Image (spheres, grey):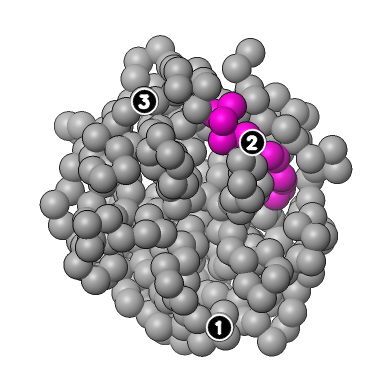
Amino acid sequence: MSDIAIRYRQNPILSPNDLSPSNPNMIIECLLNPGVFQFKDKIGLLVRVAERTIQKEGFLTVPIYDDLGKVELLNFKMDDPKLNAADARVINYDGVDYLTTISHLRVLFSDDGTHFYENKSFPSLFGEGVYESYGIEDCRVSKIDDAYYLTYTMVSPNGVGVGLRTTNDWKTFDKKGMIFSPHNKDCAIFEEKINGKYYALHRPSSPELGGNYIWLAESPDGCHWGNHKCIAKTRSGKFDSKRLGAGAAPIKTEKGWLEIYHGATEGNRYCLGAILMDLYDPSIVIARSEQPIMEPIAEYERTGFFGNVVFTNGHIVDGDTIRMYYGASDEHVCLADFSIKDILKTLGL
């Protein structure tokens, strides 16, 4: 086995029962992979909280967000011939798809990195407007100078794209809108400019020609992106044979930019691997994992809302140690440590 993660013995560190629903009409279904940041000597998480609506007899109720980020409940009669509720996750009414759960981002803080709490003076982030009406998901946080860049998945009937909000204080946010149009997700911005330009990893999807690959983009201002290049594709027979996508912001090492990414098989088993990119031209891939550096082997990773999943988009780097916060089985938030040197050894460096 190639797994080199050192799991926190008291995992999971967060489960659905540890938080309260955002709305009295909602129930927390699961907690998923958080964005991670440091702020005023504390470790912060932006946890994806997926909620479902309390159901009424004879009706199927689904939630959406309005233009102001408030939950609006849509009630459909179960015997309505326009309703197709065969899929427990996505229902269709009169030709329009709706999600049965909806996600927002909850801000949590910790003094020790393992025990997290809410501070009500720091608001949660909800979907706002037509392109976020079905929620916001899977946030990555990159700190560049004094600003935090939050890249996240925008979900709506129009598709899945990448949104950007920035903040300096975690109380007020500058909404930049959609920076990568559908279908796109898994966007992680480098935390340092290279040759005067911003760089980001992202994952467009092309189901008919091409696939779910990792791409690199560059920008003059962090908002407008171009010069896209595909840098990593799926590989038949390996842990990333069906899809792959970036985790958190790449880590600068002496050997190159180190990116921990997720890869999935046709059976939807999610593992983590590593990619090393050139320091001066990150479109050049120096090395890539042949075997995963982390696999879903713990019980809380193998069973849950959606089992056999380890998925990360957030970490803290301290010297050689990567303190990685990750989602397990699409239900819990967990913690594991990696050695950068050990990851590089798996890459033959």
Above or below, 334 against 266 in this view is below
Q: Residue at x 52, y 50 (%)?
A: 313
The residue positioned farthest toward the left in the image shown: 227
Amino acid under disc 2: Phe
Judged from the image, the secondary structure of the residue bearing numbered disc 3 is strand
Name the image quarter holding residue 9: top right
Residue holding disc 2: 338
Q: Using residue 252 as the reference point, say whether residue 48 is left or right of it.
A: right
Name the image quarter holding residue 79: bottom right
Within the magenta stretch, is there residue 87? no
Report whether residue 40 is seen.
Answer: yes
Residue 189: percent from left, percent from top: 37, 57
Residue 19: percent from left, percent from top: 77, 65
The tag earlier along the polypeptide, 2 or 1, is 1
Residue holding disc 3: 287
Amino acid under disc 1: Asp
Q: Alpha-carbon distance for marks 2 and 1?
A: 29 Å
Within the magenta stretch, is there residue 333? yes
Report whether residue 60 is seen.
Answer: no
Give the extent of the magenta segment: 332-343
The tag earlier along the polypeptide, 3 or 1, is 1
The residue positioned farthest toward the right in the image shown: 10
Residue 283: percent from left, percent from top: 23, 40
Q: Who is closer to the viewer here, 260 or 346?
A: 346
Q: Using residue 191 as the reference point, say whether residue 32 is left or right of it.
A: right
The tag earlier along the polypeptide, 3 or 2, is 3
Magenta part, dominant SS = strand
Which image quadrant: the N terminus?
A: top right
Residue holding disc 1: 169
